[in-house]
Image: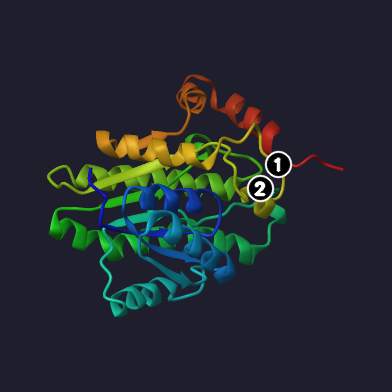
Amino acid sequence: MEYTGKTALITGASSGIGVAYADGFAARGSNLILVARRKDRLEALVTRLKKQYSVDVTVIDQDLTVSGAVAKLEKEIAKKKLTVDVLVNNAGFGLNGFFVREDRELTQQEITLNIGVLVDLTAAFLPAMVERNSGVVVNIASTASFQPVPGMAVYGATKAFVRSFTEAVWGELQNSAVRVLAVSPGSTESEFFEVAGGSSAGKPMPASAVVETTFSALEKNCPSVVVGGSNAFAAGLVRFFPKKMVINMVGKMFLPKEK
């Protein structure tokens, strides 16, 4: 696939996997639209990307959990007369704890960002890609999507939605050159657990591994991909164990220890 001269819109672009995607597309000659809440981080990233890759970078600092955020973002991009050739729905977060103790407002923001915003952004930019018969949509799921996750009940469920939704849309576009891909990373070097609380269940992989896996899967036109061989093995293995066993095993990894 050719990315030179294309424009990639990346959400959650101020840290972790989002920054790695910015580097990955810029290194392949793509111009960027970076969206996140933290303007200072975005501006520092822009300075480096422009100097390192000589691409155009547009920054839009926006909280996507706010009502009407997607429509506002869409209008801002149209106002700047930019065409979105690649959409990377990376923005999202999780909460680590017992569901009955979670802040209800934060839980709603989690569902809004992980599901609502992702679907709406896909609906906003995918039709034009189909009309042009060219484009890419990458939706970030998770290895948490393959089984229930006690301690991160809502997060795991949102990522199961993302993977199912993305694979279904991929199936609808078999007569199109547009690529749609769900990417399921495991523990990755990012601020995820700083936001979620708790700690990673294993040694985090570099965010660059997520990006390289993404480009490889896009070349093969896969509907979804798991990042890392051991993660892929574990994701497939859970199907062969009793559900109760799987839930209890995962709960031991992610449920907070009672004091």
Q: Are marks 1 and 2 in contact (CB under 8 Å)?
A: yes
Q: Is residue 37 above or below residue 144?
A: below
Residue 7 appears left or right of 205: left
Q: Which one is nearer the viewer's eye here, 75 or 174? A: 75
Point out residue 45 in the picture as x, y percentages from the top left corner. 51, 61
Residue visible at 41% across and 58% down in the picture: 10
Q: Is residue 37 above or below residue 239?
A: below
Q: Secondary structure at mark 1?
A: loop
Q: Secondary structure at mark 2?
A: helix
Point out residue 115 in the picture as x, y percentages from the top left corner. 44, 57
Point out residue 246 in the picture as x, y percentages from the top left corner. 58, 27
- Among all residues in the image, which is located at the extreme right? 259
Mark 2: amino acid: Phe
Q: Colour scheme in the image?
A: rainbow
Q: In what quadrant of the picture does the N terminus appear?
A: top left
Q: Residues within 10 Å of mark 2 (few under 14, many from 20)?
A: some
- Whether residue 19 is visible to the viewer of this picture, yes or no, is yes
Of labels 1 and 2, earlier in sequence is 2
Q: Residues within 10 Å of mark 1 (few under 14, many from 20)?
A: some
Q: In what quadrant of the picture does the C terminus appear?
A: top right
Residue visible at 29% across and 76% down in the picture: 78
Instruction: Place residue 250 in its image quadrant.
Output: top right
Mark 1: amino acid: Ser
Residue 239 appears left or right of 123: right
Instruction: Place residue 188 in its image quadrant.
Output: top right
Q: Is residue 39 above or below residue 170?
A: below
Q: Which residue is mark 2?
A: 193
Residue visible at 57% across and 50% down in the picture: 154
Instruction: Place residue 211 in its image quadrant.
Output: top left
Q: Which one is nearer the viewer's eye here, 127 or 153? A: 127
- Whether residue 223 is visible to the viewer of this picture, yes or no, is no
Q: Which residue is mark 1?
A: 199
